[in-house]
C-alpha cells in the first residue's frame, strides 16, 4: 500500500525539511511518493519563449515585514528586495545522500510555477493532484510540517478503523510548532475534532470559518465523524480523486476552499473523520515576518 503526498508550496523555505521529515519518519519510505507544486521567485524572466531566467542580484521581494514604529506608535511594514527563493526540491535531492535515492527512483514529481503566475492554494492543489501516479492513498498537507515516527502506517491503520471505510477521509488542524525543524520532535497527542464553525460579525464578506472543537480523551474505540475537511491536512484512499476531483476554477481562493471541498466530498458519499492521534505538527506563522504570502 503506497502513499502519495500532495504538497503545494508558495515560496516555501521549509519544503526540503518537510520532505526529509516525511521520508525519514515513514515506516515504508520506499512506498512514499511526493507531488510538489513549487511556486517560487526564480529570478527575472528575460525571455519567456526561451525560458531564460536571470537569478543574479536581488530580483525578488520579501513578504511584509515589521521594520519599526511610526510617530503614532503603529507598526511600519515594508517589502524588501531579496535573492531568488531556495529550490526545496533541488535541496532535498542533492544536499543529503540519504534522500537522493528517492529522487533517482522517480518518487519525487514536481511542477514549477513562477510565483508571479500563482493562482492561490486551491489551484496549486489541483495541479498537485494531477501528479498522482496510481498510489493507494492520497494525503494533502502543507509544506511546513513535521511527522511522527511511522506516520504513514499509523494513518493507514487509523482510516481502516473508520466505520465508512474505504470511503473515509481523515482530517484535522494539526497542532503547531515553532523554532527550527531539525530540533523538534512530534509527540503523539490526542487529536481534536473539526466540529466548530462561526461567522464573524465584522467580516465585510461574511463566510463560514471552521475550527477545532473538542478533543479526544484517549479511550475512543474508533475515529469520530466530523463535518469538515481541512485543506492543510487530509488523508484518504486515492479513489477520492475520481469521486471528488479538485476544482480548477478557484483562483486566489483561500477562505471557502475547505467548505466547498467538505460539501462535495460528503455529497459524493465520503464521510469525514478526525484522527484520534496527532501524527503531524504545523508551523503556524504570524503575519508580517517577511515570509511571502500569495496575496501580497
Image (tube, helix red, strand yellow):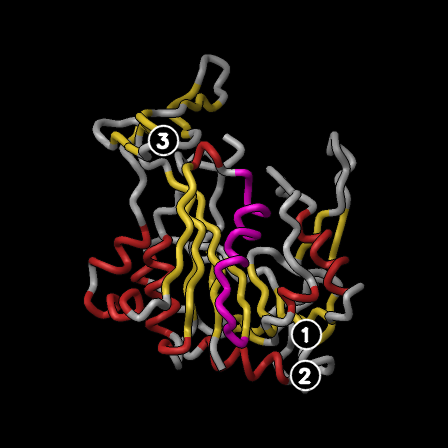
Q: In this view, does 121 lie above or below 166?
A: above
Q: In this view, does 47 lie to the left or right of 233?
A: left
List x then y, in percent, for residue 66.
Answer: 41, 28
Q: Is residue 296 above or below residue 142?
A: above
Question: What's the CA distance linking mark 2 and mark 1?
Answer: 13 Å
Q: Mark 3 points at which residue?
A: 49
- Among numbered discs 2 and 3, the one appearing first in the sequence: 3
Residues in magenta? 119-136
List x then y, in percent, for residue 240.
Answer: 65, 68
How packed mark 2 is, by other alpha carbons closer than 10 Å (few <14, some 14-19, many 20 or more), is: some
Q: Does the magenta stretch include residue 288?
A: no
List x then y, in percent, for residue 236.
Answer: 60, 71
Provide the secondary structure element on which disc 2 rests: loop
Q: In this view, does 242 lie to the left or right of 146?
A: right
Q: In the rendering, which numbered label is found on residue 168? A: 1
Nearer-the-camera pick, 63 or 265:
265
Provide the secondary structure element on which disc 3 rests: loop
Provide the secondary structure element on which disc 1 rests: strand
Residue at (78% x, 36% y) in the render: 201
Residue at (68% x, 74% y) in the render: 168
Question: What's the CA distance linking mark 2 and mark 3?
Answer: 55 Å
Mark 3 vs mark 1: in front: 3
How packed mark 3 is, by other alpha carbons closer than 10 Å (few <14, some 14-19, many 20 or more), is: few
The extreme top residue here reads: 71
Question: What's the CA distance linking mark 3 and mark 1?
Answer: 45 Å
List x then y, in percent, for residue 40.
Answer: 38, 40
Q: Mark 2 points at which residue?
A: 222
Nearer-the-camera pick, 18 or 28:
28
Amino acid at each position: 500500500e503506497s502513499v502519495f503526498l500532495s504538497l503545494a508550496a508558495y515560496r516555501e523555505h521549509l519544503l526540503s525539511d518537510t520532505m526529509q521529515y516525511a521520508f525519514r519518519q515513514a515506516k515504508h519510505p520506499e512506498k512514499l511518493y511526493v507531488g510538489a507544486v513549487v511556486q517560487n521567485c526564480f529570478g527575472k524572466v528575460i525571455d519567456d519563449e526561451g525560458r531564460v531566467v536571470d537569478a543574479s542580484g536581488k530580483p525578488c521581494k520579501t513578504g511584509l515585514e515589521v521594520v519599526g514604529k511610526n510617530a503614532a506608535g503603529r507598526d511600519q511594514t515594508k517589502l524588501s528586495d531579496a535573492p531568488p527563493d531556495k529550490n526545496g526540491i533541488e535541496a532535498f535531492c542533492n544536499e543529503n545522500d540519504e534522500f537522493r535515492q528517492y529522487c533517482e527512483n522517480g518518487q519525487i514529481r514536481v511542477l514549477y510555477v513562477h510565483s508571479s503566475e500563482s493562482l492561490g492554494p486551491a489551484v496549486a492543489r489541483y495541479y498537485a493532484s494531477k501528479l498522482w501516479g496510481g498510489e493507494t492513498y492520497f494525503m494533502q498537507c502543507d509544506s511546513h510540517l513535521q511527522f511522527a515516527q511511522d506516520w504513514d502506517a499509523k494513518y493507514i491503520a487509523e482510516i481502516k478503523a473508520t466505520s465508512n471505510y474505504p470511503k473515509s477521509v481523515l482530517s484535522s488542524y494539526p497542532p503547531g510548532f515553532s523554532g527550527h525543524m531539525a530540533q523538534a520532535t512530534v509527540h503523539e497527542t490526542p487529536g481534536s475534532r473539526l466540529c466548530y464553525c462561526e461567522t464573524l460579525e465584522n467580516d465585510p464578506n461574511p463566510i463560514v470559518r471552521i475550527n477545532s472543537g473538542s478533543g479526544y480523551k484517549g479511550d475512543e474505540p474508533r475515529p469520530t465523524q466530523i463535518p469538515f475537511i481541512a485543506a492543510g491536512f487530509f488523508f484518504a484512499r486515492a479513489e477520492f480523486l475520481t469521486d471528488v476531483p479538485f476544482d480548477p476554477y478557484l483562483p486566489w481562493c483561500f477562505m471557502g476552499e475547505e467548505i466547498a471541498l467538505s460539501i462535495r466530498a460528503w455529497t459524493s458519499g465520503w464521510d469525514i473523520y478526525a484522527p484520534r492521534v496527532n501524527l503531524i505538527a504545523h508551523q503556524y506563522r504570524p503575519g508580517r515576518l517577511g515570509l511571502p504570502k500569495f496575496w501580497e
